[in-house]
Amino acid sequence: MRDQLSGYLTGFWRVLPQIVMALVFLVLVWVAIRIVGWAVPQTLKRARMRRALRDVIVMLLTVGMWLFGILIAVTIAFPTITPGKALAALGLGGVAIGFAFKDVFENFLAGILLLIREPFSKSDFIECEGIDGQVEDITIRDTHVRQTDGQLVVAPNAMFFKNPVTIRTATGLRRTTIIVGVAYGEDVDAARDVISAAVKRVDSVRDDVKDVQIFAQEFADSSINFEVTWWTGSTPVDIRRSRDKVVAAVKRALDEAGIEIPFPYRTLTFKEALPISRDGPPGDDGR
């Protein structure tokens, strides 16, 4: 037993200088990582790169430098372990870790691609797989979306990468439409002119950019329906506010012009004639 312990101590003292050199090398790697962690964000910031993408690049550089440094340190401390053997061991371990954390790596890679491609950014209003709201943050693993009802949805990046995403604020303008019905007895051309003038007077209607479009759409049950289309701001509140103003303005203009906005009429037809009673209420003598 004593001879075995003596052999261990002798072997330790023999490799101790190599272990010290490996530790010194790791300290140098740590210093280099700290310098990179300070210099790279400053450089990327001057290039006006998004903060989340800067963080990704710094993290990848840090992980790569640590892996390279540990690999070299192991070969310094234990010369019998060649870089090829160390890489083979890392490869086998990487395969096992990859299977165990498949979804994590999928979302991680999707997050990197989203940050690089930038299909949408913070403050954009998007819709994807039933999630509809404003993007609050894009991280490496997930995206935070604040829905219009105030609820926060944290969704994995892979969902936004693999599925179609509607970006509602991709441009500053969006088109919105309402249906306006007028009675069959009214003049169609006169009604169109009244509706057009009313819509163009609304301040949120951007008729300076794109024209207001009004088309007679169909013969409905009790009215001739006009499809009224205009352009306004692209956020959901812009759409709702503009639609509210347009509806009120069109209603007011049609009322002032004496043009009827009809409600549904119903005509009831019976197969057999209905008996009509001429009896008055109880106590009535019929006179």
Image: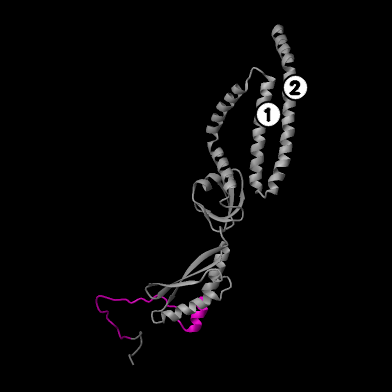
Total marks shown come to 2
* In front of the other: 1 or 178: 178
- Please identify the residue farthest to the left as the structure is shown: 272
**The quadrant where residue 191 appears:** bottom left
Write the residue at 72% across / 31% down.
29
Q: Which mark is residue 44?
A: none
Q: Is residue 15 above or below residue 277?
A: above
- Residue 267 within the magenta-colored segment of the rendering: yes
Relative to 5, say whether 146 is above or below.
below
Q: Nearer the viewer, mark 1 or mark 2?
A: 1
- Indicate the position of residue 239 as horizontal and vertical percent values: 55, 65
Q: Residue at x 64, y 41 (%)?
A: 57
Element at label 2 = helix
Range shown magenta? 250-279
Q: Is residue 260 visible?
A: no
The quadrant of the image that shows the N terminus is top right
Residue carrying label 2: 20
Badge 2 local density, few (<14 within 10 Å), some, or many (20+)? Answer: some
Q: CA distance from mark 1 to mark 2?
A: 14 Å
Which residue is identified by label 1? 69
Q: Residue 20 at what x, y percent from top left?
A: 75, 22
Q: Please say which color scheme the image uses.
A: one colour
Does 260 appear above or below 57? below
Q: Amino acid at mark 1?
A: Gly
Q: Is residue 185 left or right of residue 57?
A: left
